[in-house]
Amino acid sequence: MIKIIKPTISDIPAMQTLVEPYIKNGTILYRSDNEVATTIRSYTIIKDDDKIIGFSALHIHSSTLCEIRSLIIDEDYRRDNLASKLIQNLLDEAKDIGLKEVLALTYVDEFFKKLGFVIIDKEQIPDQKIWLDCSRCKNFPVCNEISLIKQI
């Protein structure tokens, strides 16, 4: 049975295993077990029975802006519309806590456009985002991700 839920600390090893290939190819930033643990409340996972098949995080930047991070769905489940359901869950969470804008940096802009996100110039992204996260990327400073935002 597929369910979208909040993870526990015991889910971290399975989350790390799922995301490892995408960290290696540079599409998702590496986060240590401790970093995931300290931000565990920002994550939402998708489970098929007891198997983690996807996750993402909602990272808050300010009282109005948050970011969807580390979106991953197991390849065997990608045709099931689970990524859209997970993002909608995160958008609902952002709205429920009073945020107004949701940022996404991605290589798959068409997916986010279908969910109502619009492309923005990277210069519109808060400086703290660029220097805290982007400087850790293997592609920095030549970023080829696409920046999108959605008003909620």
Image (cartoon, helix red, strand yellow):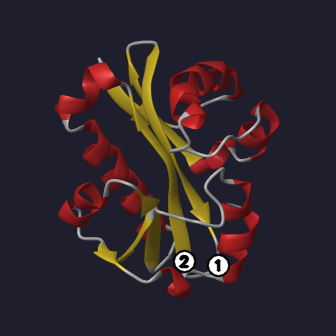
User: Dividing the picture into quarters, in which one does residue 116 lie?
Assistant: bottom left
Give the residue type that dot 1 points to.
Ser
User: Dividing the picture into quarters, in which one does residue 78 lie?
Assistant: top left
Q: Are marks 1 and 2 in contact (CB under 8 Å)?
A: yes
Q: How many neighbours does mark 1 have within 10 angstroms: few (below 14), some (14-19), or many (20 or more)?
A: few
Give the residue type that dot 2 points to.
Leu
Which quadrant of the figure contains the N terminus?
top left
- In the rendered view, does 66 fall on the left or right side of 50? right
Return the residue at label 1: 62
Out of 30 and 26, give the one closest to the viewer. Answer: 26
Give the label on residue 80, or none.
none
Image coordinates for residue 85, horizontal then vertical, percent? 28, 45
> For the residue labelled by badge 2, is the local secondary structure a helix, a strand or a loop?
strand
Relative to 7, is 62 above or below? below
Q: Residue at x 51, y 34 (%)?
A: 22
- In the rendered view, does 5 fall on the left or right side of 23? left
Q: Residue at x 54, y 65 (%)?
A: 143
Instruction: Give the CA distance from mark 1 to mark 2.
Output: 5 Å
> For the residue labelled by badge 1, is the local secondary structure a helix, a strand or a loop?
loop
Q: Residue at x 46, y 70 (%)?
A: 103
Which quadrant of the figure contains the C terminus?
bottom left
Q: Residue at x 60, y 50 (%)?
A: 42
Relative to 3, is 51 above or below? above
Q: How many neighbours does mark 2 have within 10 angstroms: few (below 14), some (14-19), or many (20 or more)?
A: many
Give the label on residue 65, or none.
2
